[in-house]
Amino acid sequence: MKRLLFSIALLIAATPVYAGAYRAVQGDMLTIERELPDGALTLHCFGKMWPAIRTETGVARAWVGVDLKTRPGSHSLKWSVTTPKSGTAQFVDRLSVSKGEFRVSHITVDRKMAVFGKEELKRIRADQQRLKNSYIAKVDAQPDLQISGMPVEGIMSTPFGAQRYVNGEPRSPHSGIDIAAPEGTPVITPLAGRVLVVSEMYLNGNTISIGHGYGVVSVFSHLKTASVKEGDWIEAGSEIGEVGKTGRATGPHLHWGVRFRQARINPESMIVKKQGY
Ligand SMILES: [Zn+2]
């Protein structure tokens, strides 16, 4: 009998149940909810594991980061539910990703901010490495990944995903949003988190990286000043610095980028829009 039960469990595990369909645009932070049997949850998509929890009502909720360069088309959301009694059952949903409508952005800067010597390149790479390390730093928190407002009041000067040209040369797409505001305007963190990096960077200027938990990390750049230090825990809505134009900036603005398990996310998509059934 035991063997028969074990075989049934294996059969369940090997037969995914196709159920739901979800939609996202490149750069979305996707919140999904669905009914699933009781048990421990995992969710895999794009070859990565994503945070999955149970809500108070027992519904499964997960968040998925759809990187800016995700291939448009159909992808699988693979849930698994494990119980000691019946083993692991799999449930597969479809996620349809469509292309983001990203604009083209041209900026003109001083030659020294576009063509780099050996020393500058070394510094730029070291800055990038510090930020990359912060994207994978462990922060022990279980955030509710919703925001009700922006870190600064201002005008969106460069939207997420814009294909950038610096002095006519194509560069990597814009992995955050730029909000133009007067120098000295307070910058607040829309989500609580641990300060991972406070640094004066060559291109990004004064920069703060904050880990919110679940592998979600915010980067705030071009600040005039930073009023937090590495290791601080900052509550949502707290001031972390002031808008500036440090680093490669044509005017005072805040650059806000969000990484989710390294995926480049449009911060605006964190103003939550749930899909579920
Ligand atoms: Zn920017």
Image (cartoon, rainbow, N blue to C red):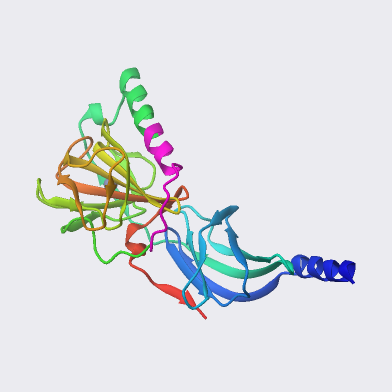
Image coordinates for residue 72, horizontal then vertical, percent: 53, 61
Farthest residue in the top direction?
118
Image coordinates for residue 230, horizontal then vertical, percent: 29, 37
Image coordinates for residue 20, horizontal then vertical, percent: 59, 76
247 left or right of 12 in image: left
129 left or right of 37 in image: left
Farthest residue in the bottom direction?
277
At x 41%, y 54%, the residue is 141
User: Quarter holding the N terminus?
Assistant: bottom right
Examine the structure image and report whether residue 10 is included in the region drawn in magenta.
Answer: no
At x 25%, y 30%, the residue is 113
Magenta segment boundaries in residue numbering: 129-144
Front-most of 219 and 228? Answer: 228
At x 27%, y 67%, the residue is 148
Front-most of 146 and 7? Answer: 7
Tell me how many marks there are: 0
Is residue 43 shown above or below 175? Answer: below
User: Within the image, what quadrant is residue 150 found in?
Assistant: bottom left
User: Within the image, what quadrant is residue 107 found in?
Assistant: top left
Is residue 239 shown above or below 110? Answer: below
Front-most of 269 and 44? Answer: 44
Image coordinates for residue 78, horizontal then vertical, percent: 63, 64
User: Within the image, what quadrant is residue 191 found in?
Assistant: bottom left
